[in-house]
Amino acid sequence: MKPPPINRTLGRLLGAALGTGQAPAPAAAPVPVPSVSLSAPAPRLSASRRRMKLWELPVRWHCPLIGTCLTPRDMRRLARQAGVDSADMSEYELHTVVVGNCAERNALSERAQRLLDERFAADILRFAKAHDDEAILALWRAAYDAGETAGALWAAWSHGATSEDAGARICGDIHMLSHQIGAGIRANLRQIDALRQENARLRGELAALRNDAAQSRREKDRLLEATRRKLSSAESRAALLGVRELELADARQAARAYSTVYDRAQMLAHRVEVVEERNAANARRAERLAQELNEMRDNLAAAEAALELALGMEEGGCAGVAGNGGCGRACPAEVRLTNRCVLCIGGRANLVDGYRRLVEAQGGRFLHHDGGLEESLHRIDTAVAAADAVICQSGCVSHAAYWRLKEACKKLDKPCVFVKSPGVGSFARGLAALADDDGSGSPHQTASAARLAN
């Protein structure tokens, strides 16, 4: 499958899901992309042939679907119509709210369903002719190659005949677009550099042509003045000497020379106009490409940040409670958590023992919840109630777990620190922030301090 045109898919793919340079918030776990065998029947998402509703789709599809098909303006309008106050929300926070509401049927998800059906009615009608995975994937690939992914994504995932394997295949295609965006930016950079060089060359040619044209005009004026003087002299001599015909012949010859020079000047003037038009067109093109480049840089930066959180690539921080990690006076070795129970939400499974050792080394007790990956979300409320403080690895939990934890901490007045990196160092700095809260501080103040520490 050839990659789709980058410039035609940027606005629809990344406009809402990957945002506007805001600090990343909780992201869903990476979606595995299994291989699809079209020769064997795949399980269906729906036992009937009816189209799937938005809240009936797998939860892991909501984030790429909303980000691809709805703009921030669409999401803000839907939130306002559903009675959600989004005035103080960043675009990513608004995206998170909309994605979270898509998991169940409510006022916001119903409005989003109607908007998607109305906006992509033509794509839905085209996909309605498909009756199996092979036909659905063929229509999807045609739209993907043409760079028209938004309507095709909604039509394919909501189709009643789409299997889990086919849907995961489409999800993988959407994921790979971010890599193609980076390649498109590099190509545009090379193209802009070539245009700049061509623009400089054309400016030099234009200056030379203008100089030639000025010289030609001066030569034309000189010849014209000389011709006028000759004509005047010829007329005087003819009147005085009676040889008017000879002088007139000389004047005609001079006039023909003037005409030749004048024609050349006209030709050069025309060439100057042509070069100026080409230069203006190239300048407009370079400006447009520069604007597209800036937009793609912003989108790529947001995409890389979101992918980095989703894949858990960010590592760093203090090496442990021994204080040899280079963190200076803020070293977690000075943290004391005696008789305090610390709950960790999310994080990497292979680092949980490291988190536990940090807490127990400071005299505290350690609890852990995986953020909804395997454990039930209902256990979050019980875990928060049993803990004295909470550290949430925000890059490793689901949207639903993130909002459930915030509500539980607010309800039970438990201090909570959100860290962006799942590393042990970030967890240690979160413990340091919790140690500053002696139980009387506000959870929101503690969370702010942790963000600054990160």
Image (cartoon, grey):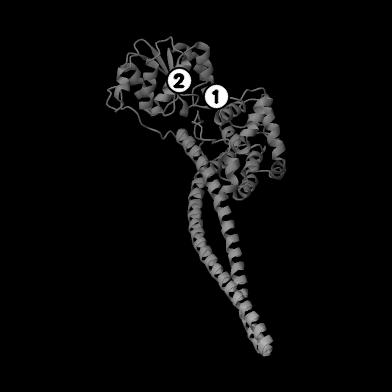
N-term-proximal mark, 2 vs 1: 1
| Residue drawn at the location 38% of the way across and 11% of the way down | 340
20 or 336: nearer the eye? 20
| Residue drawn at the location 54% of the way across and 43% of the way down | 295
- 35 in relation to 360, above or below: below
Would you identify the image quadrant in which residue 43 lies? Answer: top right
Kind of residue sitting beneath label 2: Ala
249 or 134: nearer the eye? 249
> Visible in this render: residue 3?
no
Residue at the spot of label 1: 400
Give the Cα distance between marks 2 and 1: 19 Å
Residue at the spot of label 2: 447
Residue most extreme to the front:
240
Kind of residue sitting beneath label 1: Ala
- 124 in relation to 328, above or below: below
Residue 409, horizontal then vertical, whole percent: 50, 15
